[in-house]
Image (cartoon, rainbow, N blue to C red):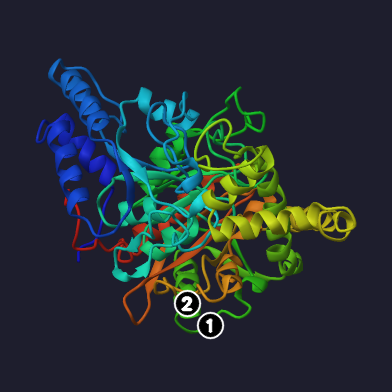
Amino acid sequence: MENKTSVIRKMHDMLVKKEMSCKEITAKYLDEIKKSELNAYVKVCEDTAFSTANAVDKKISQGEEISMLEGIPMTLKDNMSTKGIETTCCSKILKGYEPIYDATVWSTLKSQNAVLLGKANMDEFAMGSSCENSCFGGAANPHNLKHVAGGSSGGVAAAVGGNIAAYGLGSDTGGSIRQPASFCGIVGLKPTYGSVSRYGLVAYASSLDQIGPIASTVEDVSLVYDAIAGYDSKDSTSSKLAPKNTFDFLNKDIKGMKIGIAKEYFEGIGGEIKEAIDKAISTFEEMGAEVESFSLSELKYALPVYYIIACAEASSNLGRYDGIRYGHKTDSYKDINEMICKTRSEGFGEEVKRRILLGNYVLSSGYYDAYYKKAQKLRGAIVKGFKNAYKKYDAILAPTVPSTAFEFNFTSADPVQTYLTDICTVPVNIAGLPALSLPCGFDSKNLPIGMQLIGDSFSESKILNIANQFEKYTQGKFLKQVDMGVKI
């Protein structure tokens, strides 16, 4: 295994210097996808990819300048709308559905001639922490094929970690970018809520969902974030405060910066995860940062608050899948009620049904005040707790996941076991904050360990810089390339 540097910058230089054509690079990636055992892709877009590659090669041959992301092969999680390209959310109920419009993030990247290799595997409707809830089967971990890639953006993380995509876009509702990035030993950014447009993202929980980049290095994540962040009038929750040009702030000294360690994040976390995080803390201290432990007591409410709010919003958002307008429709039925019931029973997987039922329960008469209303009040307390912390600290450091990637079928007997893997990631979504997961070690099985840097609202520049300084100081020793996929 060898250490990674910026894949995007390296490939961009190769294109500009004409060391390889975009068509040749694209062909290499598509060939590796065909040979791959990762099950990272659910749809390969060969014609689309080569069409864009040819356009990029034409620009280069005519002496035109190309942007940093132009001609770079990438992937999209299968819950982002792509005009004329099947978008299923890895659910039987959306089989055959081809959107008539593009998600804003894809429209933006497409205008920059990003090469779309295909749509990536995911947990059905982004509900899961292992990618095993996909109707196409789960994505495998590039570091060990017997282990999961994580979820719900497991396909994107497997593709990037396995070198069959230079970068990808995932969505994060409760950790779905950061958790698979941690499992696959790469970098994933969940941006501030509203900084990246959600227009065209198939909704799971609208007040929690956020699109963000997954890539090999902090530098690559920064480049992609800068390309997709910004205000979008089509998204009513979009903000004009999103930072621009985070890439320009990647080399600032972090000496004197204050990093907080909320002790509640470490309850029940020990062994190799704790060891790796402790070493990372010591590294930051060596770099001149001031690291201090503190209490954020509101965190103890985060997991129940998240699952009540997420499931409540999911039960509403998924009500549109009825077999009438698009997607799967049952073959035989007596009346419309039976048709909708049978369509949804056949089309949705077990985890999606479980969360719809839970969501309807907490919103139902007699339980609304006891569960949903209380969860919203506690959400306010969690937001306030974080805001108070950022009066003192530049960033908060925490584990990304309490474990490394588990084996396939490990949690199938007890779904609640899977929910517990979200315990470190969900507070960020509840508060709408930016957070980045980056590798900080390996366990005894040589599986990656990730840590989170959590910032105040719209402080992406700051946490990306802190992460980049850590990456440089440790000389990228935690960014080890697996022996598969495309070698650039």
Q: How many labels does the image show?
A: 2
Q: Are marks 1 and 2 in contact (CB under 8 Å)?
A: yes
Q: Residue at x 48, y 44 (%)?
A: 212
Q: Residue at x 56, y 44 (%)?
A: 210
The picture places residue 438, in percent across and down from the top left corner, at 43, 60
| Residue labelled with disc 2 | 273
Q: Which quadrant of the view contains residue 56? A: top left
Looking at the image, residue 113 lies above or below residue 175: above
| Residue labelled with disc 1 | 270
Secondary structure of residue under mark 2: helix
* Viewer-side residue, 395 vs 35: 35
471 relative position to 103: left or right: left
Q: Residue at x 69, y 57 (%)?
A: 357
Secondary structure of residue under mark 1: loop
The picture places residue 268, in percent across and down from the top left corner, at 60, 81
Query: Furthest residue to the bottom?
Result: 271
Q: Which quadrant of the view contains residue 388? A: bottom right
Q: Residue at x 41, y 47 (%)?
A: 251
The Cα–Cα distance between marks 1 and 2, rounded to whole angstroms, is 6 Å
Label 2 amino acid?
Ile
Q: Which quadrant of the view contains residue 65? A: top left
Q: How crowded is mark 1: few (under 14 residues within 10 Å), some or many (20 or more)?
A: few
Label 1 amino acid?
Gly
